[in-house]
Image (cartoon, grey):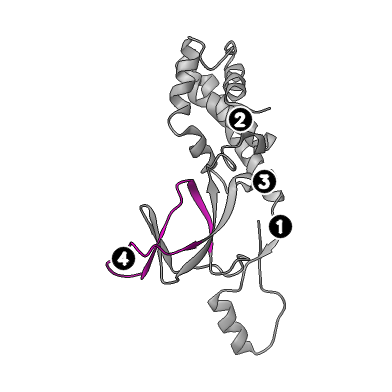
Amino acid sequence: MTTQLSIYNAALRHIGERELASLTENREPRRVLDGVWDDDFVDTCLEQGYWNFATRAIKITYSPSVEPPFGYRYAFDVPNDHVRTAAVCSDEYFNSPVLAYTTEGEYWFCDLQELYIKYVSNDNAFGMDYSLWPKTFTRWVELHLASLICERLTQNASKQEQLMKRAKRALIDARSKDAMEEATTFMPPGSWSRSRSSRVGRDRGNRSSLYN
């Protein structure tokens, strides 16, 4: 079972340090790990991909208490658990992307009165639920953490560089495995494609492209 302690100990094993008995053990490695972890470490990891296990979908209506001074007419509160936006659409099936919007601080601004949003969440029921973490994501997090504490605890820059390379490969693998879990989706044709199609006057096949 993945826990904060198991992640700490995996990172320590990667750099050749003795494991911790608990998260309160009075040792320098624990203090170094805490320093990195408390600096929004998990949020930073979640931000590195559109992880399926951490993604939630919501319908959101504009905030009547916020009146934009100019430009887009409506403001939407960005949720407190928001880490990274995956999709902004005008329909509940996420088939119609909204391109005319902007993000400023704690708000999304748009001319629509309601939006459907998919985003990477750090809520305890999503990204912060360690039981949902795939093994490949967990392995990357462990290696990434090890690379961040390595030089401080070992004074070995060469080992740190090796860990950084391993972590980079692990991130690629985690993203790839996560993408395989997504349903195949066709991007809607853009305005250029629609315009060209109307001029030609007949269908030349499926112009949509696949993406994960």
As measured in the structure, the alpha-carbon distance from the residue carrying label 4 to the one carrying label 3 is 39 Å
Residue 192: x and y in percent read 54, 78
As measured in the structure, the alpha-carbon distance from the residue carrying label 1 to the one carrying label 3 is 11 Å
Viewer-side residue, 124 vs 118: 124
Q: Quadrant of the C terminus?
A: bottom right
Q: Amino acid at mark 4?
A: Glu
Pointer 1 with pointer 4, Cβ within 8 A: no
Residue 70's quadrant in the figure?
bottom left
As measured in the structure, the alpha-carbon distance from the residue carrying label 4 to the one carrying label 2 is 48 Å
Which numbered tag is attached to residue 166?
A: 2
Count residues near mark 3 (Cα–Cα under 10 Å), then give few for <14, some for 14-19, many for 20+: some
Q: Residue at x 43, y 31 (%)?
A: 39
Camera-side mark, 2 or 3: 3
As measured in the structure, the alpha-carbon distance from the residue carrying label 1 to the one carrying label 4 is 38 Å
Camera-side mark, 4 or 2: 4
Which numbered tag is attached to residue 67?
A: 4
Would you name the residue on which mark 3 appears? 178
Which numbered tag is attached to residue 183?
A: 1
Secondary structure, mark 4, is: loop
Viewer-side residue, 188 vs 195: 188
